Amino acid sequence: MKSEGLLKPYFAQTWRFYLISILLHASASLIFAYFPRVLGDFTDHLQSGKLVTNDIARYGLLLLVIGASYSIIGGFGQYLVMYVGRLFENITRRRLFSHFSGLSEHYYSKNGVGKMLSYFMNDVTGVREAISMGINQLSMATMLLLSCVGSMIAGGIPLYLIAASVMPLLLIPWIVTRIGPVIRQRSRKVQESLGEMTESAEEQFSGIRVTKKFAVEPIMIRRFGAHVDRIRDNQLSLVRMSSLFQAIVPFLGSLSLIVALAFGGYLTVTDRITLGDFVALTMYIRMLMNPLQQIGNVINTLQRSRASLQRLTELVAVQPDIVEAEDASEIDLGRSPLRIRNLTFTYPEAKRPSLQQIDLELAPGMTLGIVGRTGSGKTTLVKLLLRIYEPPAGTIRFGDTDIRELTLESLRGQIAYVPQDGFLFSTTIRDNIAFARRQAGQNQVETAAKQARIYDNILDFPDRFETKLGERGLTLSGGQRQRTSLARGFIMQAPLMIMDDSVSAVDAVTETEIVQTIDRERRGKTNIIIAHKISAVKHADLIIVLEGGKIVQRGRHEELVATPGPYAELHTIQEEGSRYAHGY
Ligand SMILES: Nc1ncnc2c1ncn2[C@@H]1O[C@H](COP(=O)(O)OP(=O)(O)OP(=O)(O)O)[C@@H](O)[C@H]1O
C-alpha cells in the first residue's frame, strides 16, 4: 500500500523544517560528542600531575558550554519537528473530515461512526508521533552515534578497540528486524479493538434511552466489558513483546561496556592507550547505549504507526459512490417536470429490488402524496431523488436532464428534505432552523417556525430562538423535534419539498394546520408528502400507493377511496379509528 497519499504533500510543505532540525541535531551531537574527550584530556592532565586550579575551572567552563549549547541547539531542533508534527495532525484531521463529508450514506452504513472516530483520534496521533518524536529521536540518535564514533577515531582510540567494543551494540538492528513485525501486527490488533470499543460506546450512548426503557443495562455492560477485555488482552500481548525488546537493548549495551572494560583495561595497563583514552572510551560506550536504544524505540514507533498510516491512506483513497459528472449542469427544478421512467432499484449488496418499474410524472407546482406500508420503498424513492444512492441512468429526469447530469449542489440545494427524525445539532434552535440558509434573518426564521407550528413552543423556551438544544441544552419532544425540522425545510423555500413522514409525531389538529399551511404557502411549488396517515395526503393532486416497491394504485383521494384496494382499506381503518377516538 502506498503511503504517499498523506505524507508526500506534507513533507513537500515541511521539508525545510526537517532539514533545519536535522542540521541543528547534527551540530548539537557534534558538540556533545566532545564531552568524553574533554574528560579524557582532564584525566591525562590529572595523571601527569600538572593540573592547576585554573585548569579545573577551564575544564569546568568547557563542560558547561558543551552542556548548554547541546541543550539549546538540540532543544530548538526538537521544537521545530514537534511543531511540524502538530501541523500534520491539523492538516490531516481537516483533510479526513472533508473527505468523510464527501462519502456516501452507503459508506457510513457499512462503517460505523466509532471507526471513524478512532481514525481521527488514534491513527492520526500515531502517525504524528512517528513523524515528530520518532524523527526527532532518530536523527538525534544517528547524529550522536556518528559523532561519537568520529570523535573516538579522531581522538586516537585504536579502530580495533572501537570495533570490538561496539560489536554487541550492532546486534540491535538485527533484533529490531526480528521483533518489529510482530510488534506491528500486535499493535494493529490493539488499534482495531480500540476502534471496536469506540464504536460500541458510541452506539450504546446513542441508544441509552432505549436501553433504559427495556432495563437491559446489565447486558449492555457485559457486552461493553467484552470489548474492554479484548483491548486489555491485545495490549498486554503487545506490551510483552515491546518489553522483551526494551530489555534486550540495555543488555547488549552492558555487553559492550564489559568488552570496553576488559579489552580497553588490558590495553591501558600494557600502555598501548592512555588512561584518558580509556576513560573517554567507556564514556563513549555509555553515551552510545542511549541513542541505540532510542533507535530501537523509534523503529517500534515507526512499526506501530505504519499500520495507522496504512489505514489512513486506504481511507483517503476511498472514492465517494456518488460523483458529479464532469460536464454537470444546473437547472431550475421549479420549471422542470419530474419524470420517473421504468425505475427499478436494488441496494448494493441487497438480494431483491426495493423499487420496481416505477413510472411517474409530476408537473411543477403539483403535490404528490405517497402512502404505503413500512418497507414498501417510499424512503428509497426519496433517496434516489436526492441522489444519495445512484439511480440507473435515464430513470429519473427533471425536464430532459438526467439527475445524474446535474451538479449535486444544484440538485440538493433546490430540494428541501424533511425526514421523519430530522437530526438536530447541539446549537441554538435558530441555527437549527436556519441550517441550510445561514444568511436567513430573524424574520424568515420566525416565519418558518410559524409555518411549522413550532413558533408558540419556542416563545415558551427559556431563551426563545437562542435556546440551546441537545446534550447540554433543552430536550425537545418528538413532535417538537419534527416541527423544528419541518421549519428547517420551510425556510429553504425550495422549488421541491419532500416531507418523509414528517408530521407522524404531531397531533391531528396541528397536522391539519400544517397541511393547510403547505397548501397555502407552497402554492405553485412542488411538494412530495410521504405519510402513513391519509389525512396528511388527501389534498394532494396525485396520490400513489406503494407495495413491495411497486406502484399499485394511483389517483386523487376521491377516486382512490371509491376504488376497492389498499388505499380504500387504509382509509376505512383510519376513519373507523378516528370515529372510535371521537366516541361514535
Ligand atoms: N441501505 C439499505 N441497504 C439495503 N436495503 C435497504 C437499505 N435501506 C432500505 N432497504 C430496504 O429497502 C426496502 C424499502 O425500504 P424503505 O426505507 O424505502 O421503506 P419505507 O417505505 O420508507 O419504510 P418506512 O415507512 O418504514 O419508512 C426495505 O425492504 C428495506 O429493508
Image (cartoon, rainbow, N blue to C red):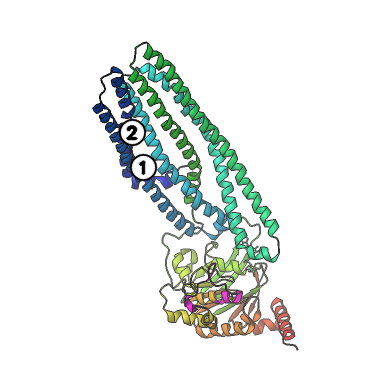
Q: Residue 470 colored magenta? A: yes
Task: Determine the secondary structure under disc 2.
Answer: helix
Query: Which amino acid, by three-letter code, is at mark 1?
Result: Gln
Please tell me the numbered disc located at residue 32.
Answer: none
Task: Judge left or right: residue 495 versus residue 545.
Answer: left
Please tell me the numbered disc located at residue 29.
Answer: 2
Does the image show residue 138? yes
Query: Which amino acid, by three-letter code, is at mark 2?
Result: Ser
Q: Residue 249 colored magenta? A: no
Q: Is residue 174 above or below residue 86?
A: above
Q: Is residue 191 above or below residue 292?
A: below
The image position of residue 104, as x and y in percent, is 52, 59
Task: Judge left or right: residue 315 versus residue 375.
Answer: left
The stretch of residues the image draws in magenta is 462-483
Question: In what quadrant of the picture does the C terminus appear?
Answer: bottom right
The image position of residue 295, as x and y in percent, is 43, 33
First in sequence, mark 1 or 2: give its number.
Answer: 2
Q: Residue at x 37, y 36 (%)?
A: 139
Give the residue at mark 1: 78
Label tally: 2
For the residue with label 2, is its CB less than 8 Å from the closest atom of ligand 1? Answer: no
In this rendered view, identify the residue nearer to me: 374 or 160: 160
Q: Residue at x 46, y 74 (%)?
A: 434
Q: Is residue 530 above or below residue 274?
A: below
The image position of residue 527, as x and y in percent, is 54, 77
